Structure formats: structure tokens, C-alpha cells
Amino acid sequence: MRRGLLGVPPLLGVVEPGDSWLHRTAPGVKLAALLVLGTVVGVVRLVVPDVVAAAVPVGLGVLVVVLARGGGLRVRLLLVQVRRVWVLLLALALVQLWSAGPLRAVATVAGLLACLWAATVVTATTPVPAVLDTVVRAATPLRRLGVDPDRLALGLTLTITSIPVVGRLLAESREAAAARGLGGDPRALLVPTLVRTVAHAEALGEALAARGLD
């Protein structure tokens, strides 16, 4: 149970109560900063030398941690994200180490962590409705191009709410595998999670279609 459903908070979408400068910053500003950070991480990996490509994401990650602490967030909130994706980080690191060298491996892992931590800071200091309202307002001018802001907000809502659902399915599959003595078999964990995730997506799609949303 320590590692089960109640052991770790969801990956994203958990709002930390507070009245810090980060909490008071407008959602649009935080989303724009997140967009800029992600763009910088992606561009740096493509156009600069390996040493700089490794140093910049590391520096951005440190900056995000400093900002999080300045905004009253717990460091544990960021460390939880590492715990949840460490397998992915390790796999990316090994692939990059083999194909592109150690500096590119550092750049890839550090860039992913910086973006994940920045997204965590945004969601931890901004209620989901405020984020969705900001997205709808920003997408309103695109209505002339056929973009439906309300449907875009619905898509984002489904994405955000699906993250803890998949996390719960993963935890349930882990506990079921452990009960059968298969805790060390990745197939006993991933296959049931994948099947149940697809089933959840199909049921969600049918529910939306029943309400007139294609």
C-alpha cells in the first residue's frame, strides 16, 4: 500500500495552496514561460555544440527548482516526478549515450526534466479551470480558421484528467502483479495497464459521442 494508490500524488494537476508570487502570477504568463522554456530546450539540442546543449538544460532545471522554492513549493513535489518517470529517463539516457555520446544524453535527460518540472510548477500554482480559461481566450482569434476554443479546452481537460486515471491503472496493475508473485515481470505490469487504458479511452470516446461530440 505504501507504493499503491495513495502513496504518491498524481503526475500533474495537483494544486498546492499558497499565496506566493508564483500563485499570483497570471496563468497566461506562466503558460507563455513554459512554452518559451520548452522551445529553448528543443532548439538548443539542435543548433548548439554538445557542451552548451548539455549545460543549458541543466541550468534551466536548476532555475526551475529555485523558482519553485521561491514560490513556496516543496522540493518533494519535483522529486516525485523523477520517481514516476525514472524508467523513461534511464532508457533515454542509455539510448542517447550509445548513439550520441554522454553530453547529448545529459542534454536529453536534463531538458526533459526541466520541462516536466516547469509544467509541475505551473499546474501546482494554477487551478486547472484558470489554465483552461486562458487557453480558450488565447484560441478565440483562431475561430476564424475553424478552431473551436471550447472543444480545444475540452481536449485539454480530458488530457489532464486522464493522467491520474492512467496512474491509477498502473498502480492497480502493479498491485495485481505483486499479488500473483509477478512483481518483477514488466509484462505483468505493462500489458494489463495498456489494455485497460485503451478500454478507458474507448469508453470515454463512446460517452462523448453519445453526447454529440465527435
Image (cartoon, rainbow, N blue to C red):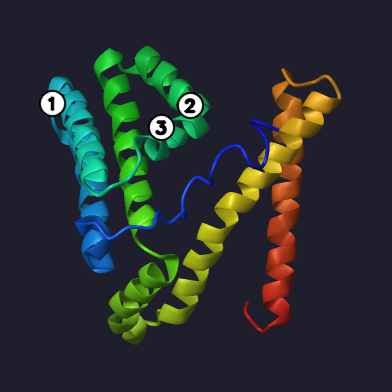
In the rendering, at what x and y percent does residue 153 appear? 45, 73
In the rendering, at what x and y percent does residue 22 appear? 24, 56
CA separation in Å, label 1 and label 3:
25 Å
In the rendering, at what x and y percent does residue 70 appear? 21, 45
Q: Residue at x 43, y 31 (%)?
A: 82
Do residues under tags 1 and 2 come within 8 Å of each other at their CB atoms? no
Q: Which residue is mark 1?
A: 52
On screen, 35 above or below 175? Answer: below
Task: Single out the mark in the foreground, 1 or 3.
Answer: 3
Whichever of labels 3 and 2 marks the residue nearer the N terminus, that label is: 3
Q: Residue at x 73, y 61 (%)?
A: 202
Whichever of labels 1 and 2 marks the residue nearer the N terminus, that label is: 1
Q: Which residue is mark 3?
A: 79
Quadrant where the image shows the C terminus: bottom right
Q: Amino acid at mark 3?
A: Leu
**Residues packed near mark 2 inside 10 Å, few (<14), some (14 to 19) or many (20 plus):** few
Quadrant where the image shows the N terminus: top right
